[in-house]
Amino acid sequence: MNDDWSAPTQASNNALRAQIDSMLDTFTAEKSALLDAQARATQLVTAWSADGLVRASGTVAGISEVHIERDAFKRSTPESLGRSVTEAISSVAAQAAETQQLALAPLSDLSADMPDLPDLIPGAPSMKDLIDQLTPPPPPAPEPVTDSPHSLVDDTDDEEGEYFRNRGYLR
């Protein structure tokens, strides 16, 4: 009589074990794909300011380099150069966030359609939590830069700035 119920139970256990093994294999493959996508999402991006005076490079983790052209002080004032630096850095941040979102989007779509392991096995690792941890929210839009309250003269017609840009002090 012991044999009558053990065969169906054994078959059910084997089927459940195979299903769980398949889910764990899928989780491992998705985790590997996620780590590859994360590496792609952290690629270095570079942006120039519109005036071509400042180049910034960085990733979603932050800015790694800011380069200012040699003749920047001849072609601009401190205020406009500050705006150029802000523009280049903001552009890098936006490009890096877009790169990250594009790299991780397929994984987000894939994991949304699948049951998560903790739904089936209490205490199992969660793919959805892993994706959420690796996908920070996009950076806030930068606030517009305004002139310093100490700037009383329009920097485009600043005689003193023109004096220094043209090296009038050497005459």
Image (cartoon, grey):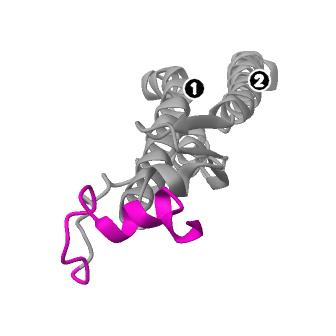
Furthest-right residue in view? 3
Q: Residues within 10 Å of mark 2 (few under 14, many from 20)?
A: few
Q: Are marks 1 and 2 in contact (CB under 8 Å)?
A: no
Residue 39, image x and y in percent?
73, 34
Task: Judge whether residue 119 can be spotted in this image.
Answer: no
Residue 92, image x and y in percent?
52, 42
1 or 2: mark nearer the eye: 1
Residue 51, image x and y in percent?
42, 38
Quadrant of the frame with the C terminus: bottom right
- Does 125 sit above or below residue 99? below
Give the residue number, with chain letter if any, for mark 2.
Answer: 25
Q: Nearer the viewer, residue 38 or 99?
A: 99
Q: Residues within 10 Å of mark 1 (few under 14, many from 20)?
A: some
Residue at disc 2, secondary structure: helix
Specify whether residue 83 is painted magenta.
no
Task: Judge whether residue 156 can be spotted in this image.
Answer: yes
Residue at disc 1, secondary structure: helix
Furthest-front residue in view? 171
Type of the residue with mark 1: Ala
Type of the residue with mark 2: Asp
Position of 32 with respect to 94 (left or right) is right
Q: Quadrant of residue 150?
A: bottom left
Position of 44 with respect to 160 (left or right) is right
Q: Nearer the viewer, residue 60 or 72?
A: 72
Give the residue number, with chain letter if any, for mark 1.
Answer: 103
Residue drawn at 49 percent across, 56 percent down: 166
Q: Give the mark nearer the N terminus: 1 vs 2.
A: 2
Q: Which residues are magenta?
A: 149-171
Residue drawn at 52 percent across, 20 percent down: 106
